Amino acid sequence: MPFKDLETAAGTRLSFQALKVALNALVAEKAVARISEKPARLRITATGRTQLDSYRS
């Protein structure tokens, strides 16, 4: 689940590349949408909200 990967990447001292991979996985699954490329800004989508809610429960 991409949110779990993101949490792992953010919660440990993993490389920027690991964080980038986790965020790109969320974008690929349409859990988040890019608002702008530079600087990278994302917003959670309805699909992402559903995934996040199921992950938290």
Image: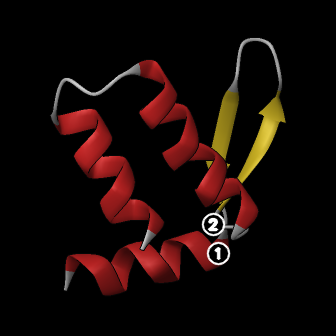
Say if 10 sits above or below 45 in the image. Answer: above
Taking the spot 46% from the left edge, 64% from the top edge, the residue there is 2
Distance of label 2 from label 1 (alpha carbons) = 7 Å
- Between 3 and 12, the residue placed more toward the observer is 12
Q: Amino acid at mark 1?
A: Ala
Q: Are marks 2 and 1 in contact (CB under 8 Å)?
A: no
Left or right: 34, with 10 as reference point: right
Q: Earlier in the sequence, mark 2 or mark 1?
A: 2
Taking the spot 22% from the left edge, 76% from the top edge, the residue there is 56
Q: Position of residue 40 (x, y in %)?
A: 70, 23
Which-is-in-front pick, marks 2 and 1?
2
Look at the image and tell me in which quarter the N terminus lies: bottom left
Q: Which mark is residue 46?
A: 1
Q: Which mark is residue 31?
A: 2
| Figure disc tally | 2
- Between 32 and 5, the residue placed more toward the observer is 5
Residue placed furthest toward the top: 39
